[in-house]
Image (cartoon, grey):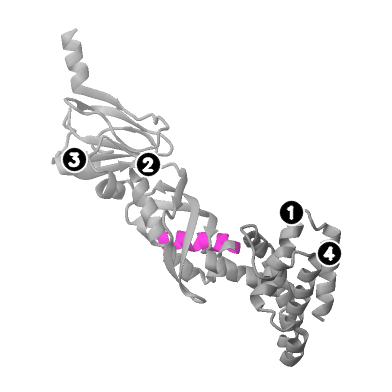
Amino acid sequence: MALMDFIKKQFIDIIEWTEAGDGTLAWRFPMQDREIQNGGSLTVRESQVAVFVNEGKVADVFPPGRYTLTTATLPVLTYLQNWDKLFKSPFKSDVYFFSTRQQIDQRWGTTQPVTIRDKDFGAVRLRAFGNYSYRIADAKLFHTEISGTRDTYTAADLDGQLRGLMLQHISDAVASSGVAFLDLAANQVEFAKALMEATQPSFTAIGLKLEGVTMQSVSLPEELQKILDQKIGMGMVGGDMGKFMQYQTAQAIPKFAEGAAGGGGGVVGDAMGLGAGVALGQVMAQQLSQGLHGGAQVAAAAAPVGVKPDDVMATLEKLGELKTKGILTQEEFDTKKAELLKKLV
């Protein structure tokens, strides 16, 4: 029994690797106290590459297939071992298997906002998230640059490095895409394509091929989101400033209503009636309309003495609060809104 164990320990007839599906990228065939038999069999399955390493130097590389190990199939190793004519058996060599299938659904994302240059705003900060996929394209290069002599090397071991490469090239991707920052959210495909092109050389340098990149979301800073909302609002009114001011006033009402919930003062505190609020709303509308058309004097005449802009906005605030709380019905709100719009003509 001891003799049989000794023989099995010394000679290897079959070399192969069955992947466990655990994200292993590189695996070293167990060779401790063992040697490869002359005429042994090497099986490399689809989505695999096998590499023979002699005394720390990469020798022969085998794509998918079944091989009989002889001097004919191991030319580099034969040269390194100085085998003149005959295959010396047994022999020592490290054998590494590499998985070349795609590693899909790898996540990338900005943990903190990334500062980039933008043609419209100079410097802005963004947060973006997506995924990518890659595969080993050059097993020899990957072995010498990344996995080395480790028994196993997994996708999880490489995750942090690749995520860093993706984030490193976000600024380059934005610049090369030619997409303005405010348009990034609507041009995610172009941005992802530019990010892939910018990052690919870094992957190639370590023996990998970046197969695909997607961007799932991009977050705009709050101040730029407000600018984008205003840009959309201008588009809705066709660039007409008078109508745009109407739009801005309508957008402001809910915000003032929220502030009123914490307690109001001035005109709102003294005039709880709905009529007072409508009257002040009309005054503000007239001021906006006349001011836009150069009629500042007309607006001043229409404004009651002593009414301050803050009081006007506070009353508009109260209108929104009354509607939100159900004191003012939708029909009543629509009626007063129509009256205000007539004053803006």
Question: Taking 49 as reference, is 109 left or right?
Answer: right
Identify the residue under disc 3: 54
**Closer to us: 9 or 254:** 254
Image depth: mark 1 or mark 2 in front: 1
Provide the residue designation for mark 1: 325
Q: Indicate which disc, 4 or 2, sits on the residue closer to the N terminus.
A: 2
Classify mark 2: residues with Cα within 10 Å, few (<14), some (14-19) or many (20+): some
User: Given the image, on which type of amino acid does mark 1 rest?
Assistant: Lys
Q: Nearer the viewer, mark 3 or mark 2?
A: 2
SS at circle 4: helix
Find disc 4 in the rendering and name its residue: 334
Res. 130 mark: none
Q: Amino acid at mark 3?
A: Asn
Q: Earlier in the sequence, mark 4 or mark 1?
A: 1
For marks 4 and 3, give the CA distance: 85 Å
x and y percentages locating residue 333 in the rendered image: 81, 63
Label 2 sits on residue: 155
Q: Are marks 4 and 1 in contact (CB under 8 Å)?
A: no
Q: Marks 2 and 1: in contact by CB < 8 Å? A: no
Q: Amino acid at mark 2?
A: Ala
Please report the bounds of the magenta region as a residue range: 186-199
Q: Determine crowd level at label 1: few under 14, some 14-19, many 20+ residues with C-alpha closer than 10 A.
A: few
Of callouts 1 and 2, the N-terminal one = 2
Q: Is residue 3 above or below residue 106?
A: above
Q: Please state which amino acid type lies under the numbered disc 4.
A: Asp
Query: Which element carries disc 1, helix, strand or loop?
Result: loop
Quadrant of the snapshot with the C terminus: bottom right
- Residue sitting at 26 percent across and 28 percent down? 39
